[in-house]
Amino acid sequence: MTASSPHILVVDDQKEICEVVQEYLSGEGYTVSAANDGAGMRKIMAQTPVDLVILDLMLPGEDGLTLARSLRDESNIGIIILTGRGETVDRIIGLEMGADDYLPKPFHLRELLARVKSVLRRASSRANEKPAGRSKARFAGWNLDLSTRELVSPSGSEVRLTTGEFDLLAAFVNNANQVLSRDRLLDLARNREAGPFDRTIDVQVGRLRRKLEDDPQKPTIIKTVRGTGYIFTPTVEVS
């Protein structure tokens, strides 16, 4: 984050929303820029550092999900997704692409401010945290590098993980052989509380199983604990 006030970039094709959010957050002491599409977003980010992007899903050209994935692949910048669709799947995919939080439209500006503060706080912690002692982990023939975020299969091939998948796998590896509830996993992986209909963890577990398990329908690495959550069963060797 910048030494002065955090710089927030609002990306929404509705100019009225950009103007309202820009005025409100500027009044709260933030530096705020606005763009109406991905090209505008990239132009601003090429000119000045940005700490947080508030990103609408429905954009002309590249949509918000594509832009979120691109942002996360390039940096640990804070990302809040705005969605007017109201569909759980959009929120899940947004978090899978690496967004820190989401906010459905219409929203209250005070709620947006609270989420902005929370995400900026977490982004600052990520930027300042020292490399973890557990930099490499080995389990069931798999190798996970926690610093480079690389996963290598028992056969030696690299397996690509989304940000959400990596964060969840790291939470499992660091808490192996412990029964973890969905709320606890969401807190460990994304540092936020689950909503009443939040299926993010279930979706991510299913995707991890398809990448890790010989038979995802009969998992031996990530097992379901009925009525409670999940448990990561392999012995983990760390270095």
Image (cartoon, rainbow, N blue to C red):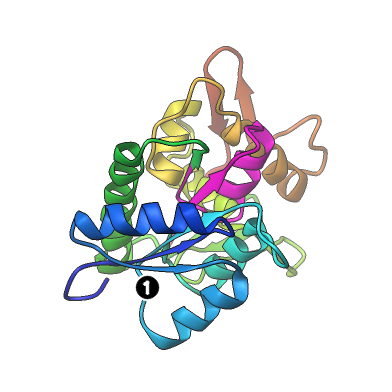
Image x and y of residue 6, in percent: 25, 67
Query: Is residue 52 positioned above or below 80 on the image?
Result: below
Q: Is mark 1 on a helix, strand or loop?
A: loop
User: Image point 30% across, 57% down: which residue?
Assistant: 23
- The amino acid type of the residue labelled 1 equals Val
The N terminus appears in which quarter of the rendering?
bottom left
- Categorize mark 1 by other alpha carbons within 10 Å: few (<14), some (14-19), many (20+): many
* Front-lying residue, 87 or 18: 18
List the single residue furthest toward the bottom.
47
User: In the figure, is residue 28 to the left or right of 166?
Assistant: left
Q: Residue at x 63, y 35 (%)?
A: 222
Vertical relation: 78 (above or below) 188:
below
Image location of residue 171, percent across then percent down: 46, 45
**Region rendered in magenta:** 79-102
At horizontal 71% and vertical 48% (from top left) the residue drawn is: 212
Using the image as rendered, state which of residue 88 and residue 209 is in the foreground.
88
- Residue 130 visible in this rendered orientation of the protein: no
6 or 138, which lies in front? Answer: 6
